[in-house]
Image (spheres, rainbow, N blue to C red):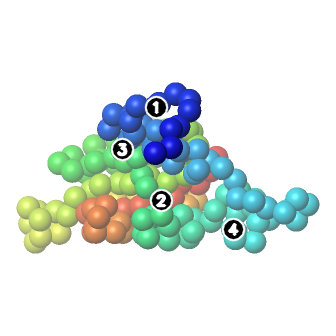
Amino acid sequence: MRRLDGPVHPRPTPAEAEQAEALFVEAVERAPFDAAPGRGRDRRTASGPGRPSAETVLRDLSRGARRISADHEVSLRGMTRDGARLCLEGFLRQRQRQRVRYVRVIHGKGLRSPGGVGVLRREVPEWLDAWRPELVERWRTAERRDGDDGALYVVLRTP
């Protein structure tokens, strides 16, 4: 049997491994694409070098190639219409100032609402459209693993 020289590194705890993974994902998301120097825009994006287009971000979220951390999501379930609008706008503006590119908005499915369609499920997309292009670049319904038709992926406009 071959002996390894050097220090033996203990296996990280699950919390340490999760934290390391989160840091890695964050670093990868911030890393620019390799654009050839002097060519201006990266051919893979419509937004310039190092910044993927909103369509690319939404596609990656749908495929599971990008993940949304818990601090980049907001749940509006159980809120009144006015309270949810204020909460959502404040959340989106705060994340935009922090230069967060995409978030998840959980509005719920409204199964307990009259008619089985929730007020927020109808209203949130209208608000997002009203906040275009100042705050929101694009949005779409989340995949089943991320909330299905009770949640939305939202790509924020960079200030």
Q: Report x, y in % for residue 111.
A: 11, 65
Mark 3 and mark 2: span between their CA atoms?
A: 13 Å
- Real-space CA distance between mark 1 and mark 4, rounded to the nearest whole angstrom: 41 Å
Distance in Å between CA atoms under marks 2 and 4: 16 Å
* Horizontal arrangement in the rendering, residue 8 relative to residue 107 (left or right): right
> Which amino acid type corresponds to the residue marked 2 in the rendered image?
Arg
Q: Residues within 10 Å of mark 1 (few under 14, many from 20)?
A: few
Q: Earlier in the sequence, mark 1 or mark 2?
A: 1
Q: Residue drawn at (34%, 69%), measured in percent from left and top?
A: 143
Residue 15, position as x, y percentages in the image: 34, 35
Secondary element at tag 3: helix
Residue at point 42%, 52% (across, down): 68
Residue that badge 3 annotates:
70
Q: Amino acid at mark 1?
A: His
Q: In the displayed image of the protein, which residue is found farthest to the right?
A: 38
Q: Which of the labelled discs sits on residue 66, or is there none?
A: 2
